[in-house]
Amino acid sequence: MMREGTAPLIRRSDYAAPAFWIRSTDLTFDLDPAKTMVINTMQVERNTEVQAQPLRLHGEDITLTRVLVNGASVSFRHEDGMLVIDALQDMPAGPFTLEIRNTCAPAKNTMLSGLYISASGFFTQCEAEGFRRITYFLDRPDVMAVYTVTMRANKAAYPVLLSNGNLVDQGDLDNGRHYAKWHDPFPKPSYLFALVAADLVARQQNIRTRSGKDHLLQIYVKRGDLDKTEHAMNSLIASVVWDEARFKLRLDLERFMIVAVEDFNSGAMENKGLNIFNTKYVLATPATATDDNYTDIEAVVGHEYFHNWTGNRITCRDWFQLSLKEGLTVFRDQEFSMDMAGAETSRAVRRIEDVRRLREVQFAEDAGPMSHPVRPDSYVEINNFYTATVYDKGAEVVRMMHTLVGREGFARGMTLYFERFDGQAVTCDDFAQAIADANPESALARTLLQFKRWYSQAGTPRVTARGRYDAPTRTYTLGIEQTGAPNGHGAKEPYVIPFAVGLIARDGRALPVQLEDAQASGATEQLLVLEEARGFYTFVNVDTEPVPSLLRGFSAPVILVDGLVNADLLVLLQHDTDPYNRREAGQRLALSRLIAAASGDAPLELDAPFIEAMRTLLRHPALDPAFKDLVLRMPSESYVAEQMSPVDPQRIHAAREAMISQLARALRADWEWAWTAHQVSGAYSPDPVSAGKRALANRALAMICRDAVALRDPVWQGRTYQRLKSATNMTDRLGALSALIHAHSEAADAALARFHDQFRHEALVVDTWFSTQATAPELDGRVFARCKELLKHPDFTLKNPNRARSLVGALCAGNPAAFHRSDGAGYVLWADRLLELDQINPQIAARLARSLDRWGQLAEPYRGLARETLSRVAAKTDLSPNVREVVTNALAN
Ligand code: ZN
């Protein structure tokens, strides 16, 4: 590991084509946990379009044993962590053979990047720069090679040997060893290479796609987990069908494999034909997984499958283009999940959830020290740029293109994108150009250069909207103004902002929207496209003063300032036909009350109109329970914090707790009704309708429990405990458990013990057991104290990323009131665990490091304590470049 000095800053503007191409590689692995031998035989060619220069290969934490060029030895040197072969600069044009032998040590690889060991065997993770930890290579995405892979390993310990592509040979060897040989016909960048040698079993299924081709789908898991793979397989089949139906993108492989592994840095990885997944996104049974887990599995299986085209068939020229594949693929998985959800209201619920995540995580990121454009201009450690900005804001940028060219137009654009670039490594510009070129008459084509500022400018734009009704002329004029990011990241040029608008009469009617120079169409929604710093739009034939419903469906990733008052928001909460804005109105009503209480001296005292609006919503005869659940979920503490400055996490917590407790009390009878009315009977199904009922019932139970604890009423606490015992699925069981824990019920400890006892052999459920405790609402420091105890629990380890996140991540990033303490003990815990984790796994450590990104916004004493702690970490000389980059940025703020 390179730990001395400062790692260099990599700049997008420094991109240069590679000096050599690697056309193919033949890899042989003699797999051994302590010392694996790798023979890497490459067909290499000089890139005659660039100036002749030595061959420089990446390599990290590996030991070179020999180098041969066309079978003859050659001199080489190591420079700046690279292997340099000077003689190759004089090679004539045309291919030559380069053979490299090296060893690596999978058992010592705790970073989980490259070739490593997890419980059942050998696994790889190569994105972004892990392949160089396996062998010397041009480990960059614009170098694409055809791979042939031979693995040799002990047969009893590692009966399953997998790599990308097709199995071409296998057999037994001496000494209880066996081998397998795989060939992947598709040239691919090294980050898509994968290898698995482990003791696994598979669920498999043959499918015939519309085009009449047969394919083998397999899901590999450790022995004993086969019964947990049905949902993942169904999700995979649905993904194959969907991509063919929606985008005409067919499965191009004879064999598509998913392998689940317990130790994994991220969610999942789209290696060509051999996706490797965190078990969290594969394994599910009704007894062990919640509705949310089921939803996530479907989304992640879809996401990785969709990468086969958007990412693998067309890949990124360099890592600055990461959003080319990630933004687009997130957009695709969001669309997939919406189409799978079916009913209009279930689709809306998905959209609300997606936007909630964006605004909670990405907006905060973009307002903080790690703010960067969707296409970053520089980085120290690329792993720090797998961010909400690249993924989720990137998906919004693609969604805006979709909005501007329409659904059909976007499909045409995708087709042109593949016609132009299939098999190549390209840029975000190339993608945007293809979508625009396929739609020459569109607003996107007209504004393309300006539109692409969404890729180049960091920060969240702010849009201020003001409307004025003129009764005599029956016109409504809307003024919209955009200003650059409020975070001081330099002046911003205006964006192209698709801005969907509706008008709601105070009696609840959706009014027709007709711009002054347009024909009447009866439409109740209009898409405005703001291109200048400001625009004015006049609607005619407006028969009464309306309440505007702005930025419908969250049509652009901006902060909207609209000046709507309580009375307006109450109208929208009751009547808006746009579900996104309807829910947003409820959130805004809650938010203004939370901010007032957290910044003033008067304790929060909920007013009758707010309570009645919530009651009406909860009791509404027609609304979807899943939607109601989202409205009745109060804004998170971190979201409230982002709307305030300075931020006092304890005051926000107190205000929010008071709000929830008052809603629990005031609506007590309604919650009891909701609990009873939303019980789901019959066999478990994760469909959105059943899941929505369970979500609302569980929220009701949590509210009742909270109120019961406040009233020292044992009856409902007892019932909740009963529910914990008798539940027939994990959603309901966890609903009962968290209701008790989060209400600080006296029955909580017994519930925790019982739950742990029942599921102690289910690693993913144990993760949930930890995170449920770590995210409980803080009360007199009890939650923090519990977390400190849990660090010593025999089941706890920092070595497994899921487990580390379930306790330390959940506390530091998911529980502001337990973390931001006036004695600074939360920060001390953060720093100590961070430094420990950095020695084990810098990528995971760097993510934990980001919990203090927003320290500069904090009120005293938190601010001073946080800065001191950050400085203490920054003063360490042996930090990984990953953590170094994050804390340096944070302190530079
Ligand atoms: Zn992805």
Image: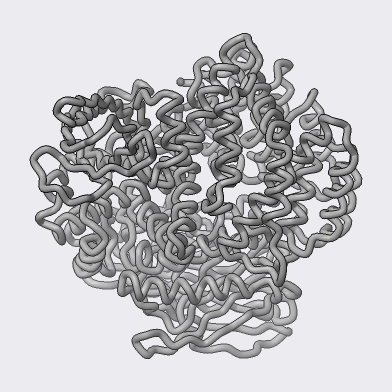
| Depicted 753 relative to depicted 20: above or below | above
Residue at the spot 56% in from the left edge and 61% down from the top edge: 688
Q: Nearer the viewer, residue 526 or 251?
A: 526
Question: For this view, does 844 lie left or right of residue 496?
Answer: right
Which percent across, then down, holds residue 151? Answer: 57, 77
Question: For this view, does 315 lie left or right of residue 889?
Answer: left
Q: Quadrant of residue 314?
A: bottom left
Residue at the spot 33% in from the left edge and 28% down from the top edge: 462
Q: Nearer the viewer, residue 151 or 620?
A: 620
Q: Nearer the viewer, residue 187 or 539?
A: 539
| Depicted 694 relative to depicted 558: above or below | below
Residue at the spot 56% in from the left edge and 58% down from the top edge: 296
Question: For this view, does 328 lie left or right of residue 178?
Answer: left
Residue at the spot 37% in from the left edge and 52% down from the top edge: 327
Q: How many marks?
A: 0
Q: Is residue 376 visible?
A: no
Q: Quadrant of residue 179?
A: bottom right
Q: Quadrant of residue 417?
A: bottom left
Which percent across, then down, holds residue 435? Answer: 20, 57
| Depicted 394 relative to depicted 490: above or below | below
Q: Is residue 841 visible?
A: yes
Which percent across, then down, holds residue 659? Answer: 65, 27
